[in-house]
Image (cartoon, helix red, strand yellow):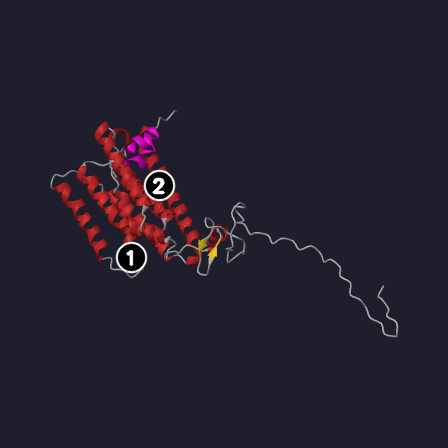
Amino acid sequence: MPDIQSGGTSTFTGMSYPGPPHAAPQTPVCYRHPDRVTYVTCTRCHRPICGDCMRSAAVGHQCVDCVQEAAASVREPKTQFGGTLRTATTPVVTWTLIGLNVLAFVLQMAVGQLEPDFALWPNGVAHFDQWYRLITSAFLHDGTLHILFNMWALYIVGPALEMWLGRLRYVALYVLSLLGGSVAVYLLSDPSSLTLGASGAVFGLFGATFVIGRRLNLDVRWVAALILINVVITVVAPAMGAGPISWQGHLGGLVTGSIVGAAFAYAPAQRRAAVGAGVTVALLVVFAVLLWWRTGVLIEPYRIVVG
């Protein structure tokens, strides 16, 4: 109670009370490394970060998690036909294809006698179900000049196509062109002959380069000249005793590659994937029907009719 002073005047004596105890300030530590004291915070999430966890940002520093989240949300730049720009400097598929062809050629030289077992022999496909020859024949070559020309051509046109189309579409183009060349050989060549070489696939790349180059308003006269030169060689070389050249494989690959290239180049951006898949399936169906028909023709004379 306050003390009351006599004489009619009252005064209050002050009384003090102890306040609540003040908590000691908490030392900030890195959210990923609790044993490290830091006074730097991420400018995005405001969590404390140590020197190992901070990444330079446009303003201040960010933590590792925020940097990774931001990178995942950034769409990789695409070319006009859906390829990623990074393939311009890293044509992985082209180098892989060249490597596979060179490896197969080295095996040819080292082992020998691979052609009878793996070259495209229509009778072997029709009568002995050796369908693998449609693929394996495209990785074998008849001599050094043969593989040098095909690999040089692949090196010239492959990286640009891989950049324009992206790796998946580029692989589809190569495989379909390869099959187109093999199917044409199976349909139109002597069924007892052996055919080998990557020329069908390479001619498919020529055709696609011409079509896509025209779509991009590029000068493609060099591609047309290259195709014309090869046509002349195909006709003239056998007449000069250089041995037969498979015009069937060249033609099949060129037509197939041009069709696939046109599908990829002229499809609307919103429907590019659907159009590409549709053309791929359609060509595979056409190839299957042609192979079925040709096989029936080749085995018909050998059917045994039971009365």
Q: Quadrant of the C terminus?
A: top left
Question: In the rendering, which numbered label is found on residue 290?
Answer: 2
User: For mark 1, what is the residue?
Assistant: 213
Pick the front one: 264 or 32 = 32
| Quarter of the view holding residue 224 | bottom left
State the image coordinates of residue 235 (x, y, percent, origin top left).
17, 45
Find the magenta span and give its range: 121-138
| Residue 78 percent coordinates (x, y) | 39, 56
Instruction: Please tell me how many numbered marks the rendered image carries.
Output: 2
Instruction: Identify residue type, mark 2.
Output: Leu
> Looking at the image, which residue is at 25% across and 43% down?
199
The mark nearer the N terminus, 2 or 1, is 1
Other-residue count near label 2 (Cα within 10 Å), few / some / many at <14 / 14–19 / ≥20: some
Amino acid type of disc 1? Gly
**Foreground residue, 240 or 141?**
141
Residue 164 visible, this orientation: yes
Q: Residue at x 17, y 40 (%)?
A: 145
Q: Residue furthest top?
A: 307
Q: Position of residue 29 (x, y in %)?
A: 54, 50
Q: CA distance from mark 2 to mark 1?
A: 30 Å
Mark number, residue 119: none
